[in-house]
Amino acid sequence: MNISTIELLGAAIGLVYIFLEYRASWWLWIAGIVMSLFYIYIFIEVNCYAWALTYLYYLGANIYGMIVWKRSSNENSYSGISSLPKKYYPTLLAITFLLTPLIAFILIKFTNTLIPISEAFSTALSVIAMWLLAKKYLQHWCIWMVVNAIYAIANFWLGLYFSAILFAVYFVVSIMGFVRWSKLAGK
């Protein structure tokens, strides 16, 4: 299989994943595991090493989220959706502003990536967003809006057009997901 075919399959699985996330379905974690495997390969092929590592992290985070959600709720339950306590904001900002330059330095010094700053910033945010999703915090959608915008633009620039479309769809669904989960959290 060539990279375009693999990218198309990864993007298709990604659409299933975002649909399941929007629905707050436990099955999102299974789709996330499969999609992660595809995107680890894709991003290694285009020298986006931080993104490949991000998807390796997603692989573990999907397993973690699957276990946490299974323990805390029914398969298709919206129970447990809540707003992120404000006490976490300073810590999450600090993590973002510490991880970004560290990842960027490593990418610039040791890899041939074409987009080290974009990769570094979106990777730092992605780590936080996955943790927030596993905890069913509403604000994970806000972080995904930023990450998905970066990924859509960068993937287009890299010539990964299926992925650029996928992340543009993710951006729109992030907005819709935030609205939907906000209503569900208020119930």
Image (cartoon, rainbow, N blue to C red):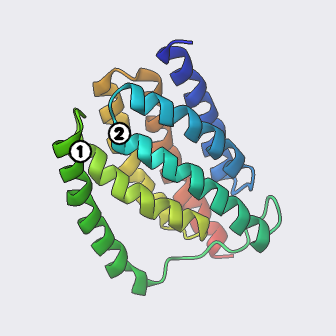
Q: The residue under label 1 is which amino acid type? A: Leu
Alpha-carbon span between mark 2 and mark 1:
8 Å
The image shows residue 18, relative to residue 138, as above or below, that is above
Q: The residue under label 2 is which amino acid type? A: Tyr
Q: Which mark is residue 49?
A: 2
Q: From the viewer's perspective, tell me whether residue 23 is left or right of residue 137.
A: right
Nearest the viewer among 144 and 124 is 124
Determine the secondary structure under disc 1. helix
Horizontal and vertical percent for residue 111? 24, 38
Q: Callout 2 environment at 10 Å: few (<14), some (14 to 19), or many (20+)? A: many
Which residue is identified by label 1? 107
- Dividing the picture into quarters, in which one does residue 124 lie? bottom left
Position of the C terminus, as image quadrant, is: bottom right
- Dividing the picture into quarters, in which one does residue 93 lie? bottom left
The image shows residue 5, relative to residue 186, as above or below, that is above
Q: Callout 1 environment at 10 Å: few (<14), some (14 to 19), or many (20+)? A: many
Total label count?
Answer: 2
Nearer-N-terminus badge (2/1): 2
Q: Residue at x 61, y 59 (%)?
A: 180
Q: Are marks 2 and 1 in contact (CB under 8 Å)?
A: yes
